[in-house]
Image: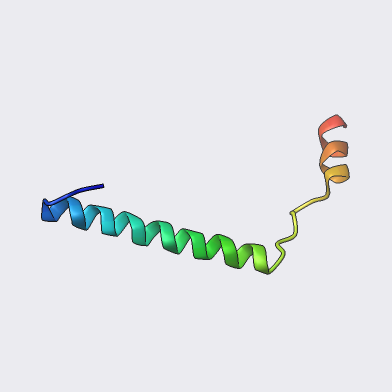
């Protein structure tokens, strides 16, 4: 995007920084292999009982 207003530029930069932080957090979670809280079978059994 083409922006020449300083406040717009600052808002873009702030949003980009936040998205980059979120991207790093997601990548870290994926790298550590997060385990689900409960297995599908346990969840299904709870839902059906």
Among all residues in the image, which is located at the extreme left?
5
Q: Residue at x 72, y 64 (%)?
A: 33
Question: Which quadrant holds residue 18?
Answer: bottom left
Model colouring: rainbow
Q: Please say if 2 is above or below 29.
A: above
How many numbered circles does the render carry?
A: 0
Q: Residue at x 65, y 62 (%)?
A: 30
Residue 12 x, y percent position in the rendering: 26, 53
Residue 46 x, y percent position in the rendering: 83, 38
Q: Is residue 7 left or right of residue 37?
A: left
Q: Is residue 13 left or right of residue 31?
A: left
Q: Residue at x 74, y 54 (%)?
A: 37
Residue 1 x, y percent position in the rendering: 26, 47
Among all residues in the image, which is located at the extreme front?
2
Q: Residue at x 70, y 62 (%)?
A: 34
Question: Which quarter shows the C terminus?
Answer: top right
Question: Which quadrant holds residue 20?
Answer: bottom left
Q: Is residue 42 left or right of residue 32?
A: right
């Amino acid at each position: 995007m083409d922006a020449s207003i300083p406040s717009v530029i600052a808002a873009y930069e702030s949003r980009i920084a936040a998205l980059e932080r979120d991207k790093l957090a997601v990548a870290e979670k994926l790298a550590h292999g997060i385990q689900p809280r409960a297995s599908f079978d346990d969840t299904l059994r709870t839902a059906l009982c």
